[in-house]
């Protein structure tokens, strides 16, 4: 070995030890005699002090530059008290080298490794191997390893078997476009990369394994976002002979420990995790992914303004809509410009406007709709919302789904703008009671709210054909700080019930056979009751590290454009490769 110690591991306990180190020059400082090198390796930094009395070592140190790869052999010694660097884990010691050897020179990097200032995304990703040397970037990737290692150990200790499932499978679209892989041996036919191992893990349960997990690579051909990439990793698990509560209890235990071990000192807001019914979450927060680190819950104030002279309220209620309000303490005199910006925010959710009512001292209202509100209506608004002098109400009158979406955007913006979010908290919540199916008017059919294999509440079975939208699923989502980090369900494990749901989704017998034949057949060979969940590792790491960009937690991410600047992909392939696959590119569409 070229090294027998790691730079970042040295302590005063190593005083007097002769060590061989190797790594990168993080910084070089020449004081006109002594040369100071900060040597960096995968464990951290240590200071190397090269004395001019050692002419050979000094000559080598004199020529090195940042990011050169060097080997050092020398003695660990204590630093003088006045030179101790308390901000550095190895700051009490330094190495006095007997030998400094250049193992490889380096070009000047396109950006500084020892300065984590902002750099253009394309430049960073094109030179990702350099960026990975930055201590902050490397720390996130190492944290990811520790979290995944812990998850593996946690599940293995509880009887789960880690089993890999194929990544070349049949195309069974699950809500996003598949990535297709043409077959050379069977021309004109295609594999797909999995959006999830859903069918395969159910087959493992039919196969009798009872407890399975894997760190599954999954692929979705969809537009990238700050929290979504085309390929991701998910903790995927499945259990036999369980109900919803069993899976949720296991996952809650897992994530409680993950938060306590890897949350960076942030506290858990509440255990057990609070649970919300889907409809309740929408009514109170406007979303099925509520951020519970701050308040600003919604109140239905329809009864307070049902007979209002303000026609926007009256019309919405007469048409079967709602009037919902959010109370913002202490903001009765919010500047007009800030209110106008919130109106635009609400329109982003589909609302036609955003009413506001400020309660000033002495009962005076500050509101463009004050003249339409009677004293009785004002009193009812105060009573329902708990508004006191100095508070502001923001109100949306529209269809329930529009009011929810619009006020959710307003709430999130207020949380950021007013600095209401407690950044020292990890706040988990479960959301259950989702509808099994939702109507797709553009397609004229029902579709699965989550996935077509999700079980439904038995007492709702008579509603399947009569009122499909009222059927409740056995789906459960885990939310952390306003982001969905896991979702799962108890599955349908009987063929007749599964076919019943497929038919509601518009599949005839032939389509069912083509798309899902292997699963339907397996359900007739003694399929046990089963349930599971999948958790996006990338999103979990986003929340643990506090970043809002998923690319920060992936070793080799794609750019926001969807391309790979590092490998220069995707790229055209040769005509010969296409011919082997029996493919030919169509000419570009004209016009």
Image (cartoon, rainbow, N blue to C red):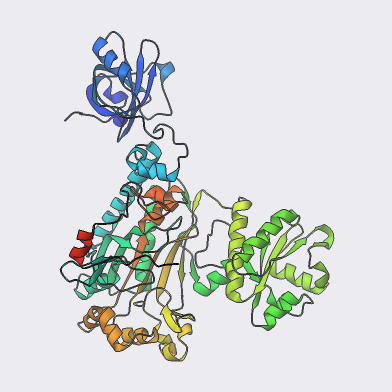
Instruction: Using the image as rendered, state which of residue 217 and residue 250 is in the foreground.
Output: 217
Residue 176 coordinates in the image, percent (x, y): 38, 69
Dividing the picture into quarters, in which one does residue 511 lie? bottom left
Dividing the picture into quarters, in which one does residue 506 lie? bottom left
Residue 195 coordinates in the image, percent (x, y): 32, 66
Name which residue lies at 45% across and 51% down.
Answer: 549
> Is 341 positioned to the left or the right of 24 in the image?
right
Instruction: Using the image as rendered, state which of residue 552 and residue 585 is in the foreground.
Output: 585
Q: Is residue 291 above or below residue 567?
A: below
Name which residue lies at 33% across and 46% down.
Answer: 566
Q: Is residue 334 visible?
A: no
- Where's the N terminus, which quadrant? top left
Q: Is residue 468 visible?
A: yes
Residue 540 coordinates in the image, percent (x, y): 40, 55
Residue 516 coordinates in the image, percent (x, y): 27, 79
Name which residue lies at 35% across and 16% down.
Answer: 35
């Amino acid at each position: 070995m070229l090294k027998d110690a790691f730079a970042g591991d040295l302590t005063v306990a190593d005083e007097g030890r002769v060590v061989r180190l190797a790594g990168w020059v993080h910084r070089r400082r020449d004081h006109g005699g002594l040369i100071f090198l900060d040597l960096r390796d995968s464990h951290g930094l240590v200071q190397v002090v090269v004395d001019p009395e050692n002419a050979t070592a000094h000559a080598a140190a004199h020529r090195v530059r940042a990011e050169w790869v060097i080997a050092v052999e020398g003695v660990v010694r204590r630093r003088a008290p006045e030179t101790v660097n308390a901000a550095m884990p190895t700051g009490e010691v330094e190495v006095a080298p007997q030998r400094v050897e250049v193992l490889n020179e380096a070009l000047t990097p396109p950006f500084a490794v020892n300065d984590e200032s902002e750099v253009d995304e394309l430049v960073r990703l094109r030179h990702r191997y350099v960026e990975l040397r930055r201590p902050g970037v490397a720390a996130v990737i190492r944290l990811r390893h520790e979290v995944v290692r812990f998850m593996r150990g946690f599940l293995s200790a509880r009887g789960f078997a880690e089993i890999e499932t194929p990544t070349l499978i049949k195309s069974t679209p699950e809500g996003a476009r598949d990535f297709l892989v043409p077959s050379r041996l069977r021309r004109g036919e295609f594999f797909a990369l999995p959006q999830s191992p859903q069918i395969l893990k159910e087959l493992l349960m039919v196969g009798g394994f009872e407890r399975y997990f894997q760190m599954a690579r999954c692929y979705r051909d969809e537009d990238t976002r700050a929290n979504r990439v085309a390929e991701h990793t998910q903790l995927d698990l499945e259990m036999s002979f369980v109900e919803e509560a069993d899976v949720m209890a296991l996952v809650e235990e897992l994530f409680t420990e993950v938060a306590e071990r890897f949350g960076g000192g942030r506290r858990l807001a509440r255990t057990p995790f609070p649970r919300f019914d889907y409809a309740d979450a929408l009514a109170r927060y406007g979303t099925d992914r509520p951020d519970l680190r701050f308040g600003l819950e919604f109140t239905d104030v329809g009864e307070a303004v049902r007979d209002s002279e303000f026609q926007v309220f009256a019309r919405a209620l007469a048409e079967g809509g709602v009037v919902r309000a959010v109370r913002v303490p202490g903001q009765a005199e919010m500047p007009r410009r800030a209110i106008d910006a919130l109106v635009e925010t609400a329109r982003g959710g589909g609302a036609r406007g955003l009413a506001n009512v400020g309660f000033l001292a002495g009962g005076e209202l500050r509101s463009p709709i004050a003249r339409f509100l009677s004293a009785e209506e004002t009193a009812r608004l105060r009573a329902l919302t708990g508004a006191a002098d100095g508070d502001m109400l923001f109100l949306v009158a529209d269809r329930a789904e529009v009011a929810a979406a619009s006020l959710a955007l307003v709430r999130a913006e207020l949380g950021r703008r007013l600095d209401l979010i407690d950044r020292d908290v990890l706040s988990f919540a479960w959301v259950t009671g989702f509808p099994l199916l939702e109507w797709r008017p553009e397609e004229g059919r029902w579709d699965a709210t989550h996935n077509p294999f999700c079980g439904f509440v038995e007492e709702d079975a008579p509603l399947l054909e009569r009122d499909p939208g009222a059927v409740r699923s056995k789906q459960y989502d885990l939310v952390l700080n306003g982001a969905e980090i896991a979702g799962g369900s108890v599955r349908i494990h009987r063929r007749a019930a599964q076919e019943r749901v497929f038919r509601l989704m518009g599949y005839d017998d032939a389509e069912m056979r083509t798309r899902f034949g292997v699963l339907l057949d397996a359900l007739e060979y003694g399929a046990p009751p089963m349930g599971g969940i999948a958790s996006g590792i990338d999103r979990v790491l986003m929340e643990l590290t506090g970043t809002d960009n998923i690319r920060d937690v992936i070793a080799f991410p794609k750019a926001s454009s969807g391309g790979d600047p590092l490998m220069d992909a995707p790229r055209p392939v040769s005509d010969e490769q296409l011919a082997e696959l029996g493919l030919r590119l169509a000419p570009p569409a004209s016009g």
